[in-house]
Amino acid sequence: MHADRRKFLTSSAVVAGGTVLGGPGMSQHSAAAPSAPETVSVREKLMECLGGEWPVPCDLEPRVIREEQKDGYRLQWLDYSVEPDDRVPAILLIPDGVSSSTPAPGICIWHQHAGQWHLGKTEPAGLAGDPMHHTGVALAKLGYVVLCPDALCFEERQDPSERLKGGNYERFEFLRYVVDGRSMAWKNILDMRRAVDMLASRDEVDEQRLGCYGHSMGSTHTWLVGPWEPRLKCLVGNCCLPTYSAIHRTKLLHCFPNFVPGWYRHGDTPDIAGLIAPRALHLNLGETDGGSPIAEARAGCERIAKIYAAAGVPDQFSYFIEPETGHVLSKSMWQKTQDVFARHL
């Protein structure tokens, strides 16, 4: 093990649970004072590996495209600016009876990858894809306002020139950020923090009760954005905690946001997730899910638990490993997800 990484792992279990430090970020709510100088160092290492500080946010300039009433909720197609000349299409689900006078908790859903670049926001919004993952609809029917944005390279954010298709465009974008000294994870985090800005700006949303959920790549997005977005009071990831040790052992080809250049010199993916402490984090895993080899994933969850315990908030982290279960959102996993949101939001 690299000497810097040994030193980092020794200290981070003690300090990683400190309050979030975000640098110049997506909103005035996104920065808070660190609890110890070491916490700043841990976050600075991660920020450096991701690609440095995020830009001062531009105006959201939200636009509502159209609306459609559904059974118990309404859909609102919209878009908003994340950077100059970069607008993100999204679908907002608003439960019936929720308004500015009766606001509800808000949840961002980060969609999966699955090699289905034609799908993004419409799957959790219940308009396409696998009904198993129509989670935005399920949460809206439980009373949450839900925002489902497209991730870079998916659905309406594929190559606008149409020269590169599917995975080729994703590979291009990943490499474009790498040669610019950043990473796709850096861009994903920027976009997700803007999504939180968007959700928090809505009159129908209680901005003190915000959370996020993601399956597969969406789970990776959950633990990536968590350390940098303290407005998210409760985060749930389903079926994705691939550690670099497992990726190297199994020669696993994974989606690009998992790869933060240089981070393995200092820690592994559970050390990123541990930086979410002291806020609530829950992870679901399938015992036979080849995308998160279970020996390392189990050890990763145990490491996160130790970080939360060292931060004095052991009850704020939980995880569930379902036996003989693969890369799915099972009934048990979904029940755990609902229970965690109900408890914390």
Image: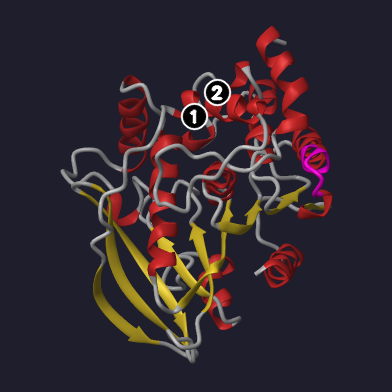
Q: Give the residue pinned by disc 2.
A: 45
Residue 194 or residue 252, whichever sits in front: 194
In this rendering, is residue 224 above or below 205?
Answer: above
Question: Where's residue 317, x and y in %?
Answer: 76, 51
Queried whether the magenta region covers residue 343, the answer comes back as no
In the rendered image, the quadrant that contains the C terminus is bottom right
Q: Which mark is residue 204?
A: none
Horizontal side, residue 332 vs residue 259: left or right: right
Q: Position of residue 45 (x, y in %)?
A: 55, 23
Q: Coloring scheme of the render? A: secondary structure
Looking at the image, can residue 120 be seen? no
* CA separation in Å, label 2 and label 1: 6 Å
Secondary structure beneath dot 2 equals: helix
Task: Name the image quarter holding residue 295.
Answer: top right
What residue sits right under mark 1 in the picture?
47
Q: How many marks?
A: 2
Amino acid type, label 1: Met
Q: Is residue 51 visible?
A: yes
Q: Amino acid at mark 2?
A: Lys
Task: Tell me what residue is drawn at x 48 percent, y 71 percent.
Answer: 146
Is residue 94 or residue 255 the one in the foreground? 94
**Secondary-structure class at tag 1:** helix
In the rendered image, residue 155, in percent from the top left (x then y), is placed at 33, 55
Circles 2 and 1: CB atoms closer than 8 Å:
yes
* Magenta span of residues: 307-313
